[in-house]
Amino acid sequence: MNIINRLTNPDLIFLIPAIIVGITVHEFSHAFASVKLGDPTPRFQNRLTLNPISHIDPMGLIALLLFGFGWGRPVQINPSFYKNGKRDRIIVSLAGPFSNILVIVLTAVIMRFTIPFLSQPLVKLGFYMMNINAVLCVFNLLPIPPLDGSKVLLEILPLSNKHELYYKMQRYSMIIFLLFIFTGLAATILGPAISRIMNIAIRFIW
C-alpha cells in the first residue's frame, strides 16, 4: 500500500487508536520495569503513566502510519540504580516488546469469548490492535540502535569494543532504517514473524 493509500485508508479510524495504545503500553512498560528495578528517573520525567501524551513521538506516529514501522518517545533510564546492571538492563529493554505480546494475548482472549456479540467495527479494531502490537514487538527487537533489540545485543555480545561499535551504528541508524524500509528488507525480514504471531492469535480466537 503506497503513502497516498495509507493516508486515505478509511480504516485509519481503527489504525490510529491501535497505534496509540501499542506505543503507550510499550513505553510505559519500559518505565515501569525501570522503576521497579530501583530507578526513579522515569517517574520524575512523568513516564510512569498510561497517558499517551507522555509517550507518543509525532514523527514515530507518522512513520508508523506511512510506512508501517514507527516508535515512541524513548524512556530515559539511569542503570546506576540497578542492583544487577546487565540483567536489569536486559529486563528493561525487553519489557516493551513483552508488553506488546501481552496486549495481543489480552485482545485475543477478549475476542475469543465476545466475538459473537461484537459489532464489525469492534472486531476490526481488535484485529488492528493485535497487528500493530505484533509490528511494534518484532520491529523493536531488531538489533539496530536505539531499538530494544540492539540494547539486548549490546549486553550479551562478548566484545571488548561493543560500546564503541554501538555508538558508531547509532550515528548511522536513520540511514539504516531508511534503507531497511525502502529496499523492502523490512517486509522480507519482519513480515514472516508478524504473520506468525497473527496466525497464532487468529487460530486461538476462532
Image: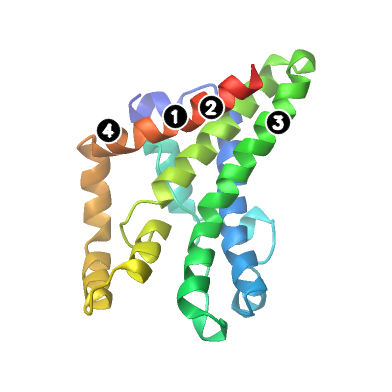
The residue wearing badge 1 is 196
Spatial CA distance of label 1 from label 2 is 6 Å
Which label sits on residue 188? 4
Considering the numbered disc 2 on the image, is that residue within a helix, a strand or a loop? helix
The type of residue carrying mark 2 is Ile
Considering the numbered disc 4 on the image, is that residue within a helix, a strand or a loop? helix
Which numbered disc, 1 or 4, marks the residue that appears first in the sequence?
4
Q: Nearer the viewer, mark 2 or mark 4?
A: 2
Residue at horizontal 24 percent and vertical 38 percent from the top: 185
- Assign the C terminus to one quadrant of the image: top right
Considering the numbered disc 3 on the image, is that residue within a helix, a strand or a loop? helix
Crowding near the residue tagged with mark 3, few <14, some 14–19, many ≥20 C-alpha atoms within 10 Å: some
Which numbered disc, 2 or 3, marks the residue that appears first in the sequence?
3
Residue at horizontal 27 percent and vertical 41 percent from the top: 181
Q: Give residue 154's position: percent from left, percent from top.
A: 33, 68
The type of residue carrying mark 1 is Arg
Spatial CA distance of label 2 from label 3 is 12 Å
State the residue in front, 115 or 152.
152
The type of residue carrying mark 3 is Val
Residue 168: quadrant of the picture: bottom left
- Position of 115 relative to 13 (above/below): above
The answer to whether the residues at label 1 and label 2 have Cβ atoms under 8 Å apart is yes
Spatial CA distance of label 3 from label 4 is 29 Å
Is 116 left, or right, of 26 in this rendering? right
Q: Nearer the viewer, mark 1 or mark 4?
A: 1
The residue wearing badge 3 is 109
The answer to whether the residues at label 3 and label 1 have Cβ atoms under 8 Å apart is no
